[in-house]
């Protein structure tokens, strides 16, 4: 197989035609998201933000990939994928057991709503064209699954047991059977007539030839079942799977009509639906029970699933990266981890000097703050006795400064007895504050220009549970690594170089943001205000939150959620409609991640920043810290860059 310079830039599974290439890049652990007890006998909806992996999941069930997997099932590289596909009933030792067909909804069907004012005719045109394309796609896939050519071998197809109500429409023979050639010609003729109508911009006449054949029913899924679709008089597969992709691209009426018929008629074929989160309204995001959407068959939300499996998803991302590396034309890089140096070289003389200088600066700052306060005398004395590496000393002094800052901020709440704190109390405070060392590391990095955003753990955190986002940042790092290899330099990127590349890449995404999402300028303004608010909190130097010392999210109360939903849905209440649209856009495009939290007897919806936005603004990547805000405050953040009195050059002055 031909090697590729940078396989990370192959971001879209739609562009990968080779079944072998697709399988080499596909991570079979992704299949664990599917419930084998439900996927074949219920309508399954799969949702995510762009790049979540919906189409990739669909593609593994197509004839090309299934045939390739069966052919290579004995090969070690594909054993795990074959085992998992066999376990869910998609393939067996005798061959593929499912006929999978992807039906794209991104083929400009919305034009019917634009050119046809009559709603019934518009929907009828949509379903008529949609039906014939489903029929053609089924026949194409059936032949492909059997290793035959479409349409050359179309005569080898036969559909038996067609319901009586379709006989006249499709010119079915008396024995309820139609041959592949007849069905193919009938479908092509209908497709040609509908397309001709679209090109002419004419409104269909009730008495014209194809006006009489217009259908308000998704009959194509009622025509077919695993028992009646034959090739060479043999069943094609035990199961038929119709996968509707990009359903969000349909108009509101088209999507509503399609879903209504699917859930009403429950076809004998298996049906999966893939769509982006943009189909959801504010009431879906902020449901009263904390769930996103409430449908008869609960949808799968890919980012939510990725978040729920924690470390397992990180391993999936690393495996995906390793698969791409193995496909590259590099002769020396064996795995993605080879490209990254995950630790600072603490033996480096320049780095040691930075840490030694930081000890002096932090120590002097502590002495200045406490010169009239004897409470911390013993703590400072013990720190001066501490013997360790320059880095260990720097962390110990920074940790001490954070604890003293916290204590000074709470000075009004304590009783001054004039007795210095014991060293045992310092150790107890360090022990109880599990995040303090991580916060100290982050604060030192910010103040003294040390790299912080580097290593495989930080990179997987940057994904924010989105595979395409991970591939974007990993691809930029790999490009640098493979370029270094070509000129015979060290291809393992230093922490400093990694951080520089990641920051540059996040800046590119930020600069494109206003053009990529609805309400782009307001979204940018809102996110900038959230980040500046977090930076202002960072200046306190108290590391009061689990996320390495500062907030990375804002929270909305239950009462505020109800007001927001009403403002989104009620034309008479537009008080917060802009805010509702901005938040909806942020959630749809994975710029904010929503979590429901109970604290202090109250329920909150916390909106955490996507990690790449944290990177861009110099915030820690960990979640945890948040503060509640009123709708009025958040609304102001959508329109104006609110001054937070932040001096980025003074962040170090804790």
Image: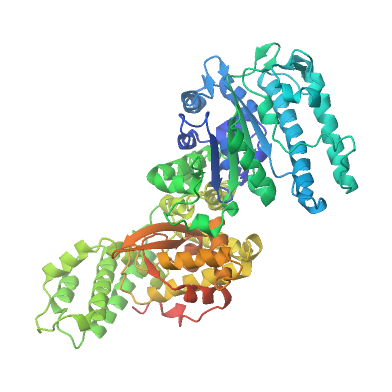
Horizontal side of 591 relative to 213 (left or right) equals left
**Residue found 36% across the figure and 59% down from its top:** 597
Look at the image and tell me in which quarter the C terminus lies: bottom left
In the picture, residue 343 is in which quadrant?
bottom left
Q: Nearer the viewer, residue 210 or 623?
A: 210
Q: Residue at x 76, y 41 (%)?
A: 124
Q: Position of residue 230 (x, y in %)?
A: 68, 16
Q: Is residue 52 left or right of residue 456?
A: right
Q: How many marks?
A: 0
Instruction: State the quadrant of the N terminus.
Output: top right
553 lies above or below 463: below
Nearer the observer, 357 or 99: 99
Residue 335 shows in the view: yes
Residue 401: x and y in percent read 26, 74
| Left or right: where 565 falls relative to 176 | left
- Residue 394 in the image, given as x and y percentages of width and height: 29, 68
Residue 328 visible (yes or no): no
Residue found farthest to the bottom: 372
Residue situated in front as seen by the camera: 542 or 393: 542
Residue 265 percent across, percent down from the top left: 61, 33
Between residue 649 and residue 243, name the one nearer to us. Answer: 243
Colour mapping: rainbow
Q: Residue furthest top?
A: 233
């Amino acid at each position: 197989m031909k090697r590729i310079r940078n396989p990370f830039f192959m971001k879209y599974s739609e562009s990968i035609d080779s079944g072998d290439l697709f399988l080499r890049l596909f991570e079979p652990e992704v299949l664990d998201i599917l419930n084998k007890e439900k996927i074949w006998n219920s309508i399954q909806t799969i949702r995510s933000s762009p790049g979540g992996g919906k189409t990739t999941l669909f593609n593994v069930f197509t004839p090309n990939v299934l045939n390739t997997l069966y052919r290579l099932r004995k090969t070690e590289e594909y054993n795990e994928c074959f085992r998992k596909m066999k376990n869910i009933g998609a393939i067996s030792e005798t061959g593929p057991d499912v006929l999978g067909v992807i039906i794209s909804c991104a083929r400009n069907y919305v034009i019917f709503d634009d050119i046809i004012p009559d709603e019934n005719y518009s929907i009828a045109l949509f379903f008529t064209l949609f039906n014939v394309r489903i029929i053609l796609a089924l026949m194409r896939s059936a032949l492909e699954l059997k290793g035959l050519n479409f349409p050359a071998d179309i005569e080898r197809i036969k559909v038996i047991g067609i319901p009586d109500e379709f006989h006249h429409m499709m010119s079915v023979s008396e024995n309820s059977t139609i041959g592949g050639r007849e069905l193919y010609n009938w479908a092509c003729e209908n497709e040609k007539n509908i397309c001709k109508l679209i090109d002419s911009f004419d409104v269909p006449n009730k008495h014209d030839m194809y006006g009489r054949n217009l259908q308000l029913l998704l009959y194509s899924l009622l025509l077919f079942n695993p028992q009646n679709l034959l090739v060479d008089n043999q069943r094609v597969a035990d199961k038929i799977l119709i996968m509707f992709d990009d359903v969000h691209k349909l108009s509101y009426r088209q999507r509503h009509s399609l879903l209504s018929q699917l859930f009403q008629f429950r076809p004998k074929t298996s049906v999966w639906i893939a769509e982006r989160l943009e189909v959801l309204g504010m009431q879906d995001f902020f449901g009263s029970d904390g769930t996103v959407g409430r449908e008869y068959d609960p949808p799968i939300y890919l980012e939510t699933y990725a978040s729920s499996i924690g470390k397992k998803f990180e391993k999936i991302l690393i495996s995906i990266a390793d698969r791409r590396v193995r496909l590259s034309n590099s002769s020396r890089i064996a795995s993605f981890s080879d490209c990254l140096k995950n630790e600072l070289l603490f033996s480096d003389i320049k780095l040691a000097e930075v840490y030694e200088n930081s000890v002096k600066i932090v120590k002097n700052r502590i002495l200045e703050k406490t010169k009239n306060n004897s409470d911390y005398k013993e703590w400072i004395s013990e720190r001066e006795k501490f013997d360790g590496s320059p880095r260990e000393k720097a962390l110990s002094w920074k940790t001490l400064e954070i604890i003293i800052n916290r204590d000074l901020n709470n000075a009004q709440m304590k009783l001054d007895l004039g007795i210095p704190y014991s060293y045992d109390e310092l150790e107890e405070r360090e022990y109880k504050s599990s995040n303090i060392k991580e916060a100290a590391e982050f604060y030192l990095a910010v103040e003294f220009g040390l790299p912080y955003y580097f290593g495989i753990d930080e990179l997987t955190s940057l994904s924010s549970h989105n595979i395409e986002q991970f591939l974007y940042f990993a691809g930029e790092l790999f490009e640098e690594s493979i370029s270094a290899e070509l000129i015979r330099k060290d291809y393992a990127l230093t922490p400093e170089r990694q951080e520089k590349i990641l920051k540059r890449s996040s800046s590119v995404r930020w600069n494109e943001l206003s053009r990529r999402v609805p309400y782009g300028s307001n979204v940018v303004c809102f996110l900038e205000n959230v980040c500046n608010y977090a930076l202002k909190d960072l200046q306190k130097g108290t590391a009061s939150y689990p996320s390495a010392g500062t907030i990375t999210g804002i929270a909305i109360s239950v009462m505020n959620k109800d007001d927001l939903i009403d403002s989104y849905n009620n034309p008479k209440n537009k008080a917060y409609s802009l805010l509702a649209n901005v938040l909806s856009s942020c959630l749809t495009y994975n710029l904010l991640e929503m979590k429901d939290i109970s604290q202090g007897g109250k329920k909150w919806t916390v909106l955490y920043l996507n990690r790449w936005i944290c990177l861009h603004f110099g915030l820690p990547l960990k979640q945890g810290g948040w503060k509640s805000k009123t709708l009025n405050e958040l609304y102001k953040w959508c329109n104006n860059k609110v001054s937070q009195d932040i001096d980025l050059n003074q962040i170090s002055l804790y």
